Image (cartoon, grey):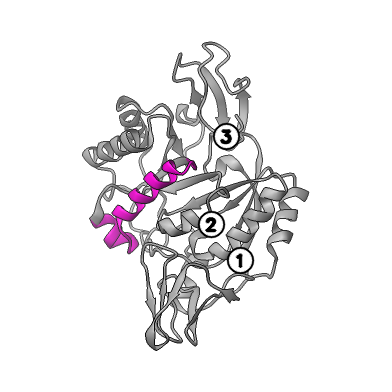
Amino acid sequence: MMEAALYSKLENNLVKCRLCRHGCTIKEGKRGLCGVRENQGGTLYSLVYDKIISTNVDPIEKKPLFHVAPGTKSFSMATMGCNFRCSFCQNYSISQPPNQSGEIVGQSLSPRELAEMAVQQGCESIAYTYTEPTVFYELARDTMIQARKMGLLNCFVTNGCMSRAMLDDSRGLIDAANVDLKAFNPGFYSKYCNGKLEGVLDTLKYMMQIGIWIEVTTLLIPGLNDDPSEVRELVRFIKNELGAHTPWHVSRFFPRYKETGIPPTDAMVLRKVRQIGLDEGLFYVYTGNIPWEPGEKTYCPGCSYTLIERSGYTIEKYAIKDGRCPKCKYEIEGIEL
């Protein structure tokens, strides 16, 4: 436990958290919406700074980040907690208990120990992932500082519900982010996530402004966010506000958590949505959770040459040379390509 960053003390021992878009005003003895930040005697504390719930070495493609040091390993870490309530959450067993039962468990590891573990296991980056890294920001920030000293990249995998103040506080530390743009419908965010679309869109635009490499993921859920007209609006936002070079990952839904009555996304629908992205002018559109598809490959925007062939998370062919297409010399956007 440690004193939280980014909050203000108010009268009557109230505190105002400024870490995420919810901006919780928290009474003494209570926690914020995330369930992991608690007001104790008028001081806000992070309850997860020393409670690591999960660490693992993953291919960076699993984040998914396809344009960040392809083919390398990423040390993934998380604590419990999240500031969303997604009814289809894949990691609900570690994201939701703090705001349901109050349970918070985990292993005590220091930021330096975490960064050293990443180096020892041959990773080129640390991914703050699995739950929502915004809610364990103090730990993530201190780990990012250690990671930077050791020459590692820092990657956030996030729902995008962080405040601009948090992004300002972490300037120069976050190299890349995969942001879930779960739908392009405010009603979807309100009903299924307990969040707001507007805040996520602002986060995406601000990340771009301050120089964070962005890749966007949309989990396509049958009947909830797969309407073609809505999909086109989402794609146009990416192209117009973030740039046509921004990778978009369209992932297949599988029944999970509270949404067990919805069938998996049909593969043909996933392919059609990918085509919408390409037709609207995005350079890099990928399909996820459906292996051995053309949508796993990276093609040159200049000449359509196949630059990276993937099979699941394994790279079978890598043709980018000095960051460029070997055929037409187009410079491929990303980090350490």
Report the mark closest to the observer, 3 or 2.
3
Disc 3 marks a residue whose amino acid type is: Ile
Q: Quadrant of the C terminus?
A: top right
Answer with mark 2 or mark 1, whichever residue precedes in sequence: 1
Q: Amino acid at mark 2?
A: Tyr
- Residue 159 position, x and y percent, is 42, 54
Residue 266 horizontal side relative to residue 336, left or right: left
Is 240 in the magenta?
A: no
**Residue in the image at 63% along x and 21% along y:** 322
Where is residue 122? Give x, y as percent. Answer: 74, 44
Please say whether residue 250 is visible from this viewpoint: yes
Residue 53 disc label = 1
Element carrying mark 1? loop
| Residue at mark 2 | 130
Residue contact at pointers 2 and 1, CB within 8 angstroms: yes
Q: What range is drawn magenta here?
A: 187-213
Quadrant of the image occupied by residue 270? top left
N-terminal of the pair, mark 3 or mark 2, is 2
Secondary structure beneath label 3: loop
Residue furthest to the left in view is: 229
Packing grade of label 3 (10 A; few <14, some 14-19, many >=20) is some
